[in-house]
Image: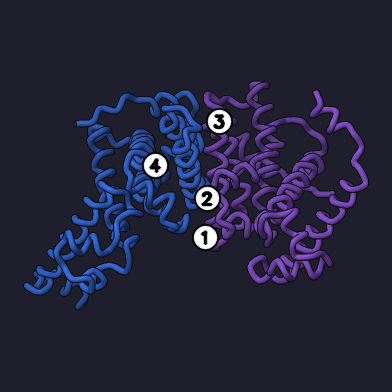
Chain colours: A blue, B purple
Amino acid sequence: MHTSDDEAAPPTRTERRRQRTRTRILEAGEQLMRERGVEAVTIHDITEAADVGHGTFYLHFECKAALVQPLIEQRAERLHEHVDRATHGERDPALRLATGIRLALSSIRSDPLWNWYVFQSGTPFRRLAEGIGAPPAEDMNRGVASGRFNVRDLRATWTFVDGAMIGVLTAWNRGALDEDAAETTAELALRSLGVPPEEAAQIAHEPLELH
Amino acid sequence: MHTSDDEAAPPTRTERRRQRTRTRILEAGEQLMRERGVEAVTIHDITEAADVGHGTFYLHFECKAALVQPLIEQRAERLHEHVDRATHGERDPALRLATGIRLALSSIRSDPLWNWYVFQSGTPFRRLAEGIGAPPAEDMNRGVASGRFNVRDLRATWTFVDGAMIGVLTAWNRGALDEDAAETTAELALRSLGVPPEEAAQIAHEPLELH
């Protein structure tokens, strides 16, 4: 009970200042890493740009990679909103999941931070998969619950689709796949969830209008 | 033309000796790495066990990981023969592919060298996928050619299935999946190739009799 009290309590002035400092470090880090690439930026560069002491950085983050983590989470969150807009609020889990897969693959591919996180950060595959997978997983759960998807083992199926996404991203990044690899991936994922091939193809190739 | 002449020519005595030395290093390395784990074995341990000089090792292999590579290729080759036996020579690409996926996943999981290669060697995903994928890929090609599989983009589809296998292996290794994860993976792969769900389930759960 005291936990929810803690959560409900308004932040103290100290806590608000702490949050502001954290945000400043995050924003400075993000800007620098986008400009110069993750590897080229040092923690010193970031503390200089954020105008905080070196030790302050470590009060908030363990290392440079720990700074990237919340930025990725933020983008995964935005991806979710993006799916809402692109599907015009339609609730068909097949359409939402396909859209989520397409947007996730193209977002990661075009985002240097996300790309670094997936391919160079040394982050274990499991956490990668969780990072990419969080929003689509929700649509998958809903589709199974409603009978839209026909799945015996939800966890294994989600692992299957998640691994497939990382495999496709890897090959796509080195130029081994066509431009519509994201659509193909969405189509195959829907098939594996029991959506009939013809319908899967149609859903996975719906035009994406992004407002 | 002189290349095929070279290939056809019987090996010289020097070449035969070279091959024997290579085999001795490989066998000594394999035995030690299976006994003690890959990380614990040094190149010195291997050259001692194979009774060759330190420099001789480097005439044949660049590093310890380069020694593991041909051992994995050998096992991938054996996997192929294994599929032949387990399918009793049946040629249905769906049955062969499902069997290949099941045997590949359980072989890698139970083989400490293969496991190390996939998860600790730092081998890029692409080469991993090629290593796992070689035999099943052949059945996949045949299934597409014969119309058994319904696939628009073969390369993207293969990348999808390959990535899925690595994703499943990762989760399986950390105990996050049920014992029948290999069957589930085979079933989902067949679905993604256009095999109807009911048939995919049946094929993926065929009893495997291994003689």
Label 1 CA crowd tier, 10 Å (few <14, some 14–19, many 20+): some
Q: Amino acid at mark 1?
A: Ala
Q: Which residue is mark 1?
A: B176
Out of A93 and B104, give the one closest to the viewer: B104
Mark whose residue sits in front, 2 or 3: 3
Locate residue B16 relative to residue A144 in the image: left or right: right
Q: Please tell me in which quadrant of the rendered image residue A90 appears.
A: top left
Compared to residue B48, the image places residue B78 above or below, namely above
Mark whose residue sits in front, 4 or 1: 1
- The residue sitting at 56% across, 39% down in the picture is B161
Label 2 vs 3, first from the N-terminus: 3
Q: Which residue is mark 2?
A: B167
Q: Please tell me in which quadrant of the rendered image residue B95 appears.
A: top right
Label 1 vs 2, first from the N-terminus: 2
Q: Which residue is mark 3?
A: B155
Mark whose residue sits in front, 3 or 1: 3
| Count of picture labels | 4
Q: Which residue is mark 4?
A: A143
Locate residue A52 relative to residue A70 in the image: left or right: left
Out of B69 and A44, give the one closest to the viewer: A44
